[in-house]
Image: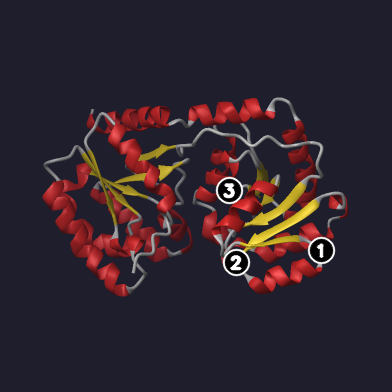
Amino acid sequence: MMNDKHKFYDFFDDVCKESRYSILVIKTLSSRYSFSYVTFLLDVFYLIFSCAVNYRKNDFIFIREFNTIPFLVTSFFLFPFRKKIILNVNHNFQRANTSIVHRYCILILDFLGFIFFCFESNESPVRLKGKVISIPFVMNDGVNKFNNNNDLSVGFVGSYRKEKNIEQVLEMLDQANTLSGCKLILGTDNKELLSTYEKKEWCTYDTNEYDDYIKAIEIVDVLVLNYDEDAYYYRHSGVLTDFINKGKVVIVPSYPYFNTQLNNPVKVGLTFTSLDEVSKLVNEGKIMLESNDFCKVLTQYKEYRTLSNVVGFLDCKLRGLTQ
């Protein structure tokens, strides 16, 4: 059954098509279909076959959403092709930060000469001898300007997962006296949570329906995310890019990849080291949104991340691999 949780990253196909290099993008079976140990096992042979068949036809082969431990088995068969194979890091560095097994697998892949590729940052929890390529996300045109005639809307929008620590954010926002004049928004797919905060007179959206997910995003001005350090310290977030693209101010924990997403090349969001800082940051977010310069800042941020610019960044990094 198809279960592509990372469809957001399909924009990378367009980046590769525009590159001056011939690049084949291979998505692992486990990222496209329902997770199981069967797909993990199949990936071992699928990647070996796909890379071997296409090695001579392409300058580089990007493997998307690889799984560290199964790929370690694959890597020994692909060792002769390693200089052309680039591994797209998604959760891999984060797991290496919390698991000694994943950490040593990453170190072995690095020792064998495989190249890692990340979006937004190249921070790693382990010291690598090889290069880590990093480029920003591509962003589309279009900015939703904040209407300062309306009350500020603050809240959380997104699917319910344990590592997002949603309850902590909602409780903090609900109890913050400084937010009494704000409209509080919750958009999620957890019906129990929606019912609880509907009784608290929050504006709620059941995001099981995509249209309601979009409505919730459109209404919120400032989004607060509290992703767990053990799950996101060394990870980017496509959701952050979605929110920024719609002209929202995002407040997130101060993690390396998030910091780059929000501050490169200009500042479009805010970060915290403790939830106690959030109510103050919400007010800073309001000031940002009401500023006449905010749209200019967003435009500058997006121009840096146009398809043509990102292709240029990628080609520059790949050229460094061939020299």
Q: Residue sitting at 60 percent across and 34 percent down?
A: 143
Along the line of sight, which residue is nearer the eye, 183 or 270? 183
Mark 3 residue type: Tyr
Please indicate whether residue 201 sits to the left or right of residue 162 in the image: right
Q: CA distance from mark 3 to mark 1?
A: 32 Å
Question: Marks 3 and 2, how far apart in space?
Answer: 26 Å
Whole-percent x, y for residue 91 in the image: 43, 57
Q: Position of residue 280 (x, y in %)?
A: 80, 45
Q: Residues within 10 Å of mark 1 (few under 14, many from 20)?
A: few
The residue where tag 1 is placed is 201
Q: Amino acid at mark 1?
A: Glu
Q: Residue at x 32, y 30 (%)?
A: 315
Q: Which residue is mark 3?
A: 255
Reading the image, the residue beneath label 2 is: 189
Q: Quadrant of the N terminus?
A: bottom left
Relative to residue 42, is residue 276 drawn left or right?
right
Q: Position of residue 225 (x, y in %)?
A: 64, 54
Residue 237 visible at all: no
What residue type is disc 2 on?
Asp
Question: Marks 1/2: CA distance?
Answer: 18 Å
Q: Say which label, 1 or 2, has the lower sequence index.
A: 2
